[in-house]
Amino acid sequence: GETRPFLAKINVSFYSNSNYYSFEIPSLGFSHTQTIIEDYVWNRIKDELIGEAGGWGLIKLGYMPPEGGKKNGRFTLLDFKNFCPYKVNIDDFREARSHFDVEEWMDILLGAIDYNPDGFARNGWIHRDIWKAKHTMLTRLLPFIQPRVNLIELAPQQTGKSYMFGKISKYGWLLTGGQVSRTMLFIDRRPGAHSKGLVTCNDFIAIDEIKSIEFANDKEMAGILKGYMEDGYVTVGGIRIDGEAGIIFLGNIAYELMDSDKDMIGDINPIFRDSALLQRIHGFVPGQHVPALSPRMYINNWALNSEYFTEIMHILRSKPETMKYRGMVEELVDVKAATGDTSGREKEAIFRLCTAYLKLFFPHADSSLTRTTKFKLEFDKYCLTPAKSMQETVLKQMRFVNPGMYPDGNLGFSTYSVKWD
């Protein structure tokens, strides 16, 4: 008979061991073990889905009879059309931003990712503590809005890391547990397999649980990650693989270890205790500032639509937008080397993070606004100072891994300041 579409919310999962996608429809009681998304369907609908979060949409289902003596068959997803009740106009978004001050805008952005800005306060906290918690939560969005931002965040459990990278945007991918391979991330050269890896079709790849994650080949993965994180491409078997995806490493550590002057990476997978790999990371997210999630931190009122906001961030990743905001950063920031020349990686990390922050907090910025004293003060607080701190933490962790790089203990960190003239 005829298959009719119906409106429902689905969640999607990838089973790496068997190399297939499945889905669940909670409202109908369909679980992942009962379903499958065939490859030809996945390739057609993947851009409609919000990563593993799936999303609301018009769904068509089919049924695959039992095979190989199995008792039960599976429901198959035949089609999915994202339910999108709005149009995205980046100029309207910029114009709307101009009607709010930056603290109000921060609260609007928190609402857009499902958090209640009034729920961040804790007993004994002053305004600066609350500001740090909000700013750090939004720092996680930098890879959503800027190409090839590489981050690491080690934080206590229940601070929302996995939710942010796995449930907010359809343009990113969260890898949790199991085994990560070159095939999964970059290219699968087996006959009949998917040729493109996750870095070629996502804005970011977040690798969760880095204390327990396994790699199919540690030495190979370390080398290929270093090449990709540095250049945005790798060559595998004579084939060049390009990507715009940032790489994010996530893990849990005890709160008392969360100090940039302590060795925070001593207990994670040895692949990450490599100064050359750490050099490719642009920033260390200060997860110690984010409180454990509680019911009052989730929004229960009107807010900016999450899917709309993630579309805006995706648009702001485009090359013309990135060049425009990067140009503003170049005009705003003065660099003075501590000794000799400024490290190219250090400067690129800080400028790339600043560009992402500028897009996030000041999407309406133009040459007129950036000349004002008020804007420069806010840029320093919201963009430049956090970017410097995040990169400096990376350098401090490199010192623990390879003390020989800094025999006198001096990081050689350059001075980055706002140009006031």
Image: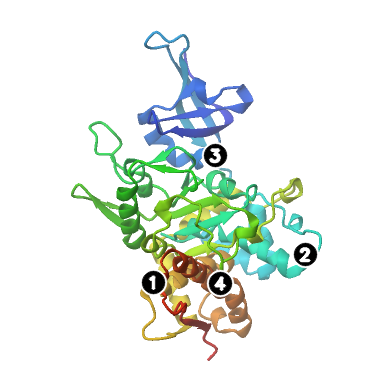
Q: Nearer the viewer, residue 265 or 157?
A: 265
Percent position (x, y) of residue 285?
Answer: 55, 61
- Count neighbours of disc 2 (C-alpha within 10 A) and say few if under 14, some if 14 to 19, many if 20 or more: few
| Separation of marks 1 and 3 at Cα, in angstroms | 44 Å
- Residue type at mark 2 is Trp
Mark 4: secondary structure:
helix
Q: Which mark is residue 125?
A: 2
Residue corresponding to mark 1: 404
User: Marks 1 and 4, Cα distance to the nearest angstrom?
Assistant: 31 Å
Of the numbered discs 1 and 4, the one sitting upstream in the chain is 4
Q: Is residue 137 above or below residue 179?
A: below
Real-space CA distance between mark 2 and mark 1, rounded to the nearest whole angstrom: 40 Å
Between marks 4 and 2 in the image, the one whose residue lies nearer the viewer = 2
Q: Earlier in the sequence, mark 3 or mark 2?
A: 3
Q: Amino acid at mark 1?
A: Gly
Instruction: Say whether residue 103 is visible.
Output: yes
Q: Please, what secondary structure does the residue beneath circle 2 have? A: loop
Which residue is denoted by mark 3 in the rendering? Answer: 53
The amino acid sitting under disc 4 is Cys
